[in-house]
């Protein structure tokens, strides 16, 4: 009976052992090549699998793509979008768009973990959305959607047991997604409490990382979305043959006017009819943001994780702060003074630590055709971004000198009232 069972199940057991051994191997298996066409597709795909994974991002960034961190603004493809302009005018760089709806600082920090080699001593672009900095911070379901065991395992195999890692572990433990692997969850608990990992945990994490890395190489390029690359190609056809700011500005004005001509907010007609018209008809959105604040949030500490990581890797970063559509802001009651206070607070967090490359567009919300909807950049907004992004990426820049301060992880900073900022600055001197 035993021999019969062995004949039946033996091959299956052997196959399972071989598959496990192959996946757990710490070496690449010859599937590392990513074609140029796959890199171009992935760079604009905004695919969750690409964001969670490693292989395609790593190979594309090695080939000269530049990481553009952000969230839902990247999905607004019009002729002035960074990916379109870079392609049309054969720029020395191509954006690799990292982020989509719901991705915030905590997600971006873990995205960085398996592309550290491609960030070290390089350049990057990072869009800071004021809307991230709400009272509750990043949504747990949104974080879970982009959560990657591969990125977490990679991080846990090289963490340093300092303030940045302890805070990151504590934040991750607050997310239900962290419980998807019992052994990783247990390792996070030790890191969060300032303890070293056990020998078994280190062995498990290394093995798990190897398995997930091999899986990523096998599957990361399968069913890669191509519709956004088609959009980039279509939008590029609308641009003049040669780059001219005045011609592009005029084109942006014409396109923006045609696309926003049936509502009083300067919002794209499509977005207005799909998402707002019905609600506006019943007056449900009037003054609905009057009590909203972006000045007290755990997002400030999550954002510090990203700054800390950039400083460790000596990454030169251009930060972009987009505006809010001014007409929409007034209608919904969103406080202009609160937005100014947020701007001051985020500037202090950046500049006091040596991050001085900032494109602050927060005062441009009333410029015609600058926005495509309520909070996202559009035609002239993207063109304004390009005026800073292009020279930043194509010309030699002075290497910044960072001075990271762990106080930005504190509850005091997260909840600091903007009116107390001056006093806080004086105490820090």
Image (cartoon, rainbow, N blue to C red):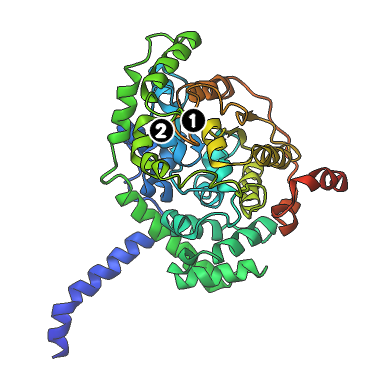
- Residue 318: % across, % down: 60, 31
Q: Position of residue 333 (x, y in %)?
A: 58, 41
Whichever of callouts 2 and 1 sits on the residue coming sooner in the sequence is: 2
Residue at numbered disc 1: 377
Element type at marker 2?
Answer: loop
Q: In the rendering, at what x and y percent does residue 18 appear? A: 28, 66
In percent of width and height, residue 112 lies at: 53, 47
Task: Please state which of residues 214 and 153 is positioned toward the viewer in this rendering.
Answer: 153
In 3D space, how far apart are the residues under numbered discs 2 and 1 (Cα atoms)?
8 Å
Please give the residue where the numbered disc 2 appears in the rendered image: 76
Q: Residue at x 47, y 21 (%)?
A: 92
Name the side, left or right, on which 213 lies relative to 201.
left
Q: Quadrant of the C terminus?
A: top right
Judge from the rendering whether residue 183 lies leftward or rightward of residue 23; answer left or right.
right
Left or right position of 362 against 419: left
Q: Is residue 18 above or below residue 79?
A: below
Task: Say whether residue 92 is left or right of residue 358.
Answer: left
Marks 2/1 in contact by CB < 8 Å: the verdict is yes
On the question of residue 383 being in view, the answer is: yes
Q: Residue at x 56, y 26 (%)?
A: 366
Quarter where residue 350 is shown: top right
Residue 130 is tagged as: none
**Depth order, front residue of 142/341:** 341
Would residue 33 be seen by someone viewing this image from the given angle?
no
């Amino acid at each position: 009976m035993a021999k019969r069972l062995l004949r039946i199940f033996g091959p299956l057991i052997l196959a399972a052992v071989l598959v496990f051994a192959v996946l757990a191997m710490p070496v690449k298996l010859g599937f590392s090549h990513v074609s140029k066409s796959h890199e171009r597709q992935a760079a604009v795909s905004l695919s969750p699998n690409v964001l969670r994974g490693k292989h395609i991002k790593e190979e594309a960034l090695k080939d000269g793509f530049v990481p553009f961190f952000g969230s839902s603004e990247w999905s607004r493809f019009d002729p002035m979008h960074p990916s379109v302009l870079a392609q049309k005018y054969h720029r020395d760089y191509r954006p690799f768009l990292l982020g989509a709806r719901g991705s915030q600082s905590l997600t971006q920090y873990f995205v960085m973990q398996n592309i550290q080699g491609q960030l070290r001593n390089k350049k990057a672009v990072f869009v800071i959305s004021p809307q991230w900095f709400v009272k509750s911070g990043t949504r747990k379901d949104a974080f879970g959607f982009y959560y990657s065991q591969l990125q977490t395992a990679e991080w846990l195999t090289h963490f340093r047991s300092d303030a940045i890692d302890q805070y990151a572990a504590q934040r991750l433990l607050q997310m239900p997604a962290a419980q998807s692997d019992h052994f990783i969850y247990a390792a996070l608990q030790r890191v969060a409490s300032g303890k070293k990992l056990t020998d078994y945990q280190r062995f498990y994490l290394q093995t798990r990382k190897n398995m997930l890395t091999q899986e990523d190489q096998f599957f990361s390029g399968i069913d890669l979305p191509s519709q956004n690359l088609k959009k980039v190609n279509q939008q590029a056809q609308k641009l003049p043959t040669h780059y001219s700011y005045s011609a592009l500005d005029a084109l942006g004005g014409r396109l923006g006017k045609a696309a926003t001509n049936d509502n009083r907010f300067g919002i794209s007609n499509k977005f207005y009819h799909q998402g707002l018209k019905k609600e506006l008809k019943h007056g449900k959105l009037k003054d609905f943001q009057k009590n909203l604040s972006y000045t007290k949030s755990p997002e400030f500490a999550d954002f510090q994780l990203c700054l800390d990581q950039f400083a460790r890797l000596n990454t030169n970063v251009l930060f972009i702060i987009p505006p809010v559509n001014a007409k929409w802001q007034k209608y919904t009651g969103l406080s202009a003074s609160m937005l100014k206070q947020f701007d001051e607070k985020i500037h202090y967090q950046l500049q006091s630590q040596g991050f001085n490359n900032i494109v602050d567009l927060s005062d441009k919300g009333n410029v015609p055709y600058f926005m495509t909807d309520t909070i996202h950049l559009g035609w002239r907004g993207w063109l304004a971004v390009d005026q800073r992004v292009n020279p930043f990426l194509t010309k030699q820049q002075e290497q910044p000198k960072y001075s990271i301060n762990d106080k930005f992880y504190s509850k005091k900073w997260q909840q600091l009232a903007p009116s107390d900022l001056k006093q806080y600055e004086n105490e820090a001197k």
